[in-house]
Amino acid sequence: MWWAKRTPSWFCTLLDAEGARFWTGRRTASGGLENPGSCRGELQGELDRFGGVSVHLSRHRTLHGLDAAAFRRLLQAAVQQWRTEGRIAVWLHIPILQSHFIAPAASLGFCIHHAEPHSSTLTLWLGEGPSRLPGYATHQVGVAGDTAVREVFEETGVRSEFRSLLGIRQQHRSPGAFGMSDMYLVCRLQPLSFTINFCQQECLKCEWIDLEYLARTKHTTPITSRMARLLLYGHREGFDKIDLSMEEFPAVHTGLFYKLYHRELPESYRAATGTD
């Protein structure tokens, strides 16, 4: 059995680990270290692993007392520099006491991504085409079912059909989900085609990998290793031992349906009203 890989994350079943982020001594967009007391002539930001820049205005003490027009000029110069450096996006974190900087940022194309009790986060997409920045919600849920099939085809060119849900990864206070809870649903898909024609805007590399190799290698993340071993077990012993199958039921709202995932229920129990 073979499996497919993409970068920066494993599609369907495999997900790259999220690294912890720290403030002290972080790398800036210009390659130096972020200095909270930097001069007014330079607005620095922290680089992320996706090619974006995060700017926390609360860490630039010298912005206190700066008027909106001066901040706009400072931000405009920084954005031009980040474009030159090939950055794909800017995340601008504005404390509530500096909310007067929102209007000048908006005049440069920034949009509000989300707000919290004491701060607002604005974004500016610098890459080609429409923005691919993730949306914001109180909880983040990964793809499953039909959505997984569509995403795999759009990003790899491989056609597939949904077979089961393998597991659910849950973590709280996730940096990749803006400090909120993050749920990732791991799916098993059956490939219907094998020719790869991946989206170069979404993936850096995409290839078929031997499942046994993936289960043995130490050069991967814990979730990748566990899912690979689970799939190998199902392939050898039967997928009924690992699958959470899906059934569709009518919802309480007329004309709507929901999908329920669970271990296979024996036929003798499907229509039973009791356990006698």
Image (spheres, rainbow, N blue to C red):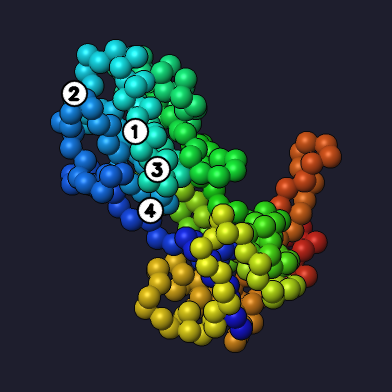
Kind of element beneath mark 1: helix
Q: Could you give the CA–CA distance between mark 3 and mark 4, rounded to whole angstroms?
A: 18 Å
Residue type at mark 3: give it: Thr
Looking at marks 2 and 4 on the same chain, the residue that comes earlier in the sequence is marked by 4
Q: Which residue is mark 4?
A: 49
**Do labels 2 and 4 touch, CB within 8 Å?**
no
Q: Which residue is mark 3?
A: 84
Kind of element beneath mark 3: helix
Looking at marks 1 and 3 on the same chain, the residue that comes earlier in the sequence is marked by 1
Q: Could you give the CA–CA distance between mark 4 and mark 1, rounded to whole angstroms?
A: 19 Å
| Image: 37 above or below 127 | above
Looking at marks 3 and 4 on the same chain, the residue that comes earlier in the sequence is marked by 4
Kind of element beneath mark 4: loop
Q: Which residue is mark 1?
A: 78
Left or right: 72, with 182 as reference point: left
| Residue 164 x, y percent position in the rendering | 66, 66
Q: Which residue is mark 2?
A: 62
Mark 3 closeness class: few <14, some 14–19, many ≥20 residues within 10 Å: few
**Do labels 1 and 3 touch, CB within 8 Å?**
no
Specify the quadrant of the image occupied by residue 83: top left
Q: Closer to us: mark 3 or mark 2?
A: 3
Q: Could you give the CA–CA distance between mark 2 and mark 4, rounded to whole angstroms?
A: 27 Å
The one nearer the camera, 253 or 70, is: 70
Looking at marks 3 and 2 on the same chain, the residue that comes earlier in the sequence is marked by 2
**Do labels 2 and 1 touch, CB within 8 Å?**
no
Q: Could you give the CA–CA distance between mark 2 and mark 1, rounded to whole angstroms?
A: 16 Å
